[in-house]
Image: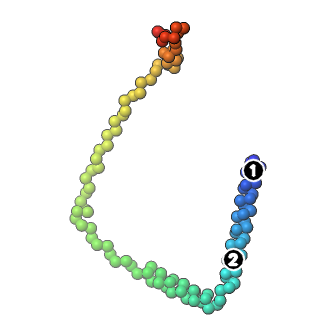
Amino acid sequence: MRRANALVLSLALGIAAVAGTVAATRTAALGARASDSQIEQRTARLDRFETALDKAARDRPPALPALRAAAQAPSPAPPRVVYVRPAPVPALSSLREAEHDHEDDDRGEQADD
């Protein structure tokens, strides 16, 4: 690894470590400032929400309506896809023939083969 790449990588990791430390410190400070009454209120809200989720999980949803007759009929066969190959590209028999076709003779005219 080149030194410049190693330097950029180490700087990026250092910045990420500093940002993570600051975030963890702020989070811990927020937890320390919360009062017991706030924690109890939030816990009570979470308990009510958990009870509602448990009740919703126990309740069964209503039965689905029956399908209509048109929806039960078999669908028509999909259209048939036909692949048509493109015409072949003409190829030169050799590269040397192509080179000689464009060479000029001494008089500046096209050489005849």
Above or below, 55 relative to 81? below
Above or below, 14 relative to 43? above
Please report whichever mark, 1 or 2, sits nearer to the chain's N-terminal start.
1
85 or 35, nearer to the observer = 35
Direction left: furthest residue: 69
Direction front: furthest residue: 107
Image coords of residue 77 (percent x, y): 27, 50
Where residue 16 is drawn, which disc sits there? none
For the question of whether residue 85 can be seen, the reply is yes
- What residue sits 70% from the left and 68% below the top? 19
Horizontally, residue 76 falls left or right of residue 84, namely: left
The secondary element bearing badge 2 is classed as: helix
Image coords of residue 2 (percent x, y): 75, 47
For the question of whether residue 97 can be seen, the reply is no
90 or 80, nearer to the observer = 90
100 or 64, nearer to the observer = 100
**Type of residue at label 2?**
Arg
Above or below, 58 relative to 69? below
Q: Label 1: which residue?
A: 4
Looking at the image, do the residues carrying marks 1 and 2 touch, with CB atoms under 8 Å apart?
A: no
Question: What is the image's colouring?
Answer: rainbow
- What residue sits 51% from the left and 11% below the top? 108
Horizontally, residue 105 falls left or right of residue 23, namely: left
Q: CA gap, disc 1 to disc 2?
A: 33 Å
The image quadrant that residue 12 belongs to is bottom right
Image coords of residue 112 (percent x, y): 46, 9
The secondary element bearing badge 1 is classed as: helix
The image quadrant that residue 44 belongs to is bottom right
- What residue sits 29% from the left and 44% below the top? 80
Q: Label 2: which residue?
A: 26
- What residue sits 50% from the left and 84% below the top? 49
